[in-house]
Image (cartoon, helix red, strand yellow):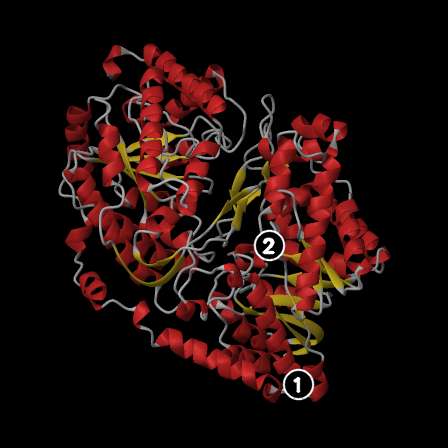
Amino acid sequence: MTSKSAAAAARSTVHGYPRQGQHRELKKAIEGYWKGRVGADALRATAAELRRGNWQQLAGAGIDEVPTGDFSYYDHVLDTSVMVGAIPDRHRAAVAADALDGYFAMARGTQDVAPLEMTKWFDTNYHYLVPELGPDTVFTAGSGKQVAELTEALALGLTARPVLVGPVTYLLLSKPAPGVAADFDPLTLLDRLLPVYAEVLADLRAAGAVWTQLDEPALVQDRSPAVLNSAARAYRDLGALTDRPKLLVASYFDRLGDALPVLAKAPVDGLALDFTGAAAANLGDLAAVGGLPGRRLVAGVVNGRNVWINDFEKSLSTLGTLLGLADRVDVASSCSLLHVPLDASAERDIDPQIARWLAFARQKTSEIATLARGLAQGTDAIAAELAANRADLASRAGSALTRDPAVRARAAAVTDADGRRSQPYTERAAAQRAHLRLPLLPTTTIGSFPQTAELRTARADLRAGRIDGAAYEERIATEIRDVLAFQEKAGIDVLVHGEPERNDMVQYFAEQLTGYLATQHGWVQSYGTRYVRPPILAGDISRPEPMTVRWTRYAQSLTDRPVKGMLTGPVTMLAWSFVRDDQPLGDTARQVALALRDEVGDLEAAGTSVIQVDEPALRETLPLRAADHAAYLAWATEAFRLTTSGIRPDTQIHTHMCYAEFGDIVQAIDDLDADVISLEAARSHMQVARELAAHGYPREAGPGVYDIHSPRIPSTEEATTLLLKGLEAIPAERLWVNPDCGLKTRGWPEVRASLENLVAAAREVRATLPDSVS
């Protein structure tokens, strides 16, 4: 270790904090604003109150330096686009007329104007809005939000650090604007963007910022020498500014690799690095470049993406090593705490033994403060906390709740043959065509239909005892009848039951599987006002009884058309849960796959001829480094095949993926060996269809023609245009017509109109096809 003064300088901080509030106050206020029930001033007041509460909670937990600028009405990347003036031409009039309404128009679109594309934030389940740039983009500084929030925090007497998306990451996450050549590289705009960042930094310094954080997580991915040179130039120029706060460049989610020496040599004042999971390699890499002499290191030793308690002794060992590599070492979360729920103490229904193992955002801030105190004052100062932590870790390691010998024996007995269908696709396809007798360009939906206020009320009434189980089930049955009747009237070919009984596509299954825990208040932002409650995977997984057969069988009894059985796939069950950190993910995936395999078999036995196993998270869980891709994709695709391979050839297996970049996993999509895949394609104008065609994808596909993440109702003409683009890449005998994703979050009026237009488009295009195609 270095001198005591270096350790004494240790302070605590975080990169960001959950935005929604304890009771999702932000979601309610924003949605009230959209519906005209909440005024703009009231919305802003709610936001200000939530920010103030967050900062005060952080300070009360012992966090020495709070972040500002991480709060957002919708998305922090969209906030960055506003900050640098990168407003798409189609939204400029709306932004000029009303900045707040224009902001939401970029996020959600209007009936006349499409929103920005949305995709996953690295390998998380958070979605960001993709900036649209071109050679004519003119950047202009708008630091009002960042300055105002810093000023609010400083007025509370807090030490505050503004947090911005860094310029290199911002450009790397951008895409060419509509009408711009597809090969346009937004990074060529760096020299145009840096003066805008310089102006924002000057404004923040004038407002009282001592430090400002620039997040560059895109640099933890494999990057070319040209990109690394751009990063070096960016921080050479920003570091050379005289009118600026001290600069802290942050990365997270993985190791920096080749980018670490670039940033270590840059004339910035500190780095924030992740030291958890795969990013633990940053420790050796930092030592290899000679550390950060004379500069600040913010050490992310508390995992900001999972809910398990920290191992204090392991973290203190890492921190002790780091003391010799920097002038000042501060303790932090590995990334923003946006990715975990707010407060584990609110969960009253979790087994007290298991509750000891959990740390949500508030508990993590306490862990960070404890570690900072231990680093600065020595382990004697936190002796009681260390003893309690050791006991909690031992409790989990030795608990019978985490291990089921029968589950482990079954997983160990799996063979390669268990993951292969009995016939190749070409033979299965012929059997399925004869069995299902579908028209060309068959229409379907992804699974869910609107979760109405009446359905949510019924679920709440059941929990509260205001209605009994029989009354609740009759409400569900009524909804299924209505959903089936609408689909038949609209002319949809392959129907769904609408999932009215399901609260969430992962939670619903997790509540019926052993080894999972559900929370009551563990909300995490997925996008905008969409929050989910990821279940917690605490032990070995098995399926005590069928989960979906009853309602699927009931729906099929109401119609002669095929009704899809709907399941969530094993990778998505992991990706949208808080997973175990005490065994390899592939082992857990195999356990989940075997449980789902039993469900697939029971659905088929009950007469279900089409079964959809959704894997929207296959791409988002792809490791950020290419060297790690093959191992991940091997177990991920094996888990899907293990789920779906134990059935007859004439049973059609569908899968679904949405809101991710699919081009680099097309081979893995092929390796799933699903009969039909549906994918998001509307906002990206059928890009995925072209990617499938370029790969030579041999199976059936449904690139979406209806963007369900916007309240817009696509016209028949719009759906027809997208469908014709799809036909340019995928032959008619293999092309399906469907929305981008499930309809759970939409309202019935827009769903009715949109699906009627979708069916009309399919019929119009179908009528133009030559007889020889059919």
Q: Is residue 305 above or below residue 698?
A: below
Crowd around label 1: few <14 · some 14–19 · many ≥20 (10 Å): some
Q: What residue lies at 53% left-to-right and 75% top-to-bottom?
A: 284
Judge whether residue 290 can be spotted in this image.
no
Q: Report x, y in % for residue 637.
A: 30, 50
**Sequence-wise first label, 2 or 1:** 2
Q: Which mark is residue 18?
A: 2
State left or right for residue 271 relative to residue 466: right
Q: Which mark is residue 377?
A: 1
- Towards the viewer: 399 or 146: 399
- Towards the viewer: 534 or 662: 534
Crowd around label 2: few <14 · some 14–19 · many ≥20 (10 Å): many
Tag 1 secondary structure: helix
- Towards the viewer: 674 or 504: 504
Q: What residue lies at 44% left-to-right and 56% top-to-bottom?
A: 623
Q: Is residue 570 above or below residue 312?
A: above
Residue type for callout 1: Gln
Tag 2 secondary structure: loop
Q: Which mark is residue 303?
A: none
Badge count = 2
- Residue occupying the far front of the picture: 466
Marks 2/1: CA distance? 30 Å
State left or right for residue 416 relative to residue 480: left
Q: Report x, y in % for residue 515.
A: 32, 60
Residue type for callout 2: Pro
Q: Report x, y in % for residue 702.
A: 36, 30
State left or right for residue 202 relative to residue 365: right
Q: Report x, y in % for residue 228.
A: 60, 57
Disc 2 + disc 1, Cβ < 8 Å: no
